[in-house]
Amino acid sequence: DGGITQSPKYLFRKEGQNVTLSCEQNLNHDAMYWYRQDPGQGLRLIYYSQIVNDFQKGDIAEGYSVSREKKESFPLTVTSAQKNPTAFYLCASSMEARGVHNEQFFGPGTRLTVL
Amino acid sequence: GQNIDQPTEMTATEGAIVQINCTYQTSGFNGLFWYQQHAGEAPTFLSYNVLDGLEEKGRFSSFLSRSKGYSYLLLKELQMKDSASYLCAVFNQAGTALIFGKGTTLSVSS
């Protein structure tokens, strides 16, 4: 089955610790994205990658880092510099970054709680 | 920059028709998407409009007016399972990623 996987579904961390959220896709999509969702805020773009070994900051990149060493994988690290890390994190991918083929397919999300 | 406005909440009854509006300001329009998101789940794609007019897909239709910076999602024959958030999204200035509105939470009652 093709799709996007994120694990784990729920993640708890202590304040001051870095944590890496995984995102894997087997759809052969070039573009991948990370969003954060808070209640009443909709989806906000953290980082995106149009192609392997390349990525760009979104609207709220501060306190986050990413890598894109493989086409299938786009892990997100939430660093201790992120002031309010508790949120629902969604990963998405699309065939390409532009046009109609930008239809984004989302993973199931990871709910991160920092204690 | 970009700005997307949608109503925060709407309510409707089963079998009714509801229209969810979205207005946007963006420099360089490359298309508008509608997504559905049930509580605690991932968003799923509903529609994509890049030209003016109405796109119909079963019970759901989406309309776009580029000159007015306006779109709406029309849901007919509402069912309880249509209770969800509906997200409007447009491309960023570079045309390489989507910027989402805050979403409209629709509650359908019997």
Image: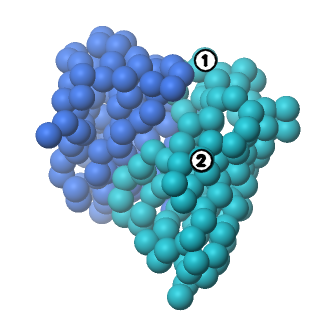
Residue type at mark 2 is Glu
Nearer to us in this view, B15 or A96: B15
Q: Chain of mark 1?
A: B
- The quarter in which the N terminus of chain B is drawn is top right
Residue type at mark 1 is Ala
Q: Are marks 1 and 2 in contact (CB under 8 Å)?
A: no
User: In the current view of this chain or complex, which residue is farthest to the right?
Assistant: B68
Res B94 label: 1
Chain B, chosen colour in render: cyan
Are dots 1 and 2 on a single chain?
Answer: yes
Residue at figure coordinates x 45%, y 33% from the top left: A103
Residue A111 on image: x %, y %: 31, 57
Nearer to us in this view, B87 or A66: B87
Residue at figure coordinates x 23%, y 59% from the top left: A10
Indicate which label's residue lies in the foreground, 1 or 2. Answer: 2
- Asked if residue B47 is positioned above or below residue B42 in the image, the reply reads above
Chain A, chosen colour in render: blue
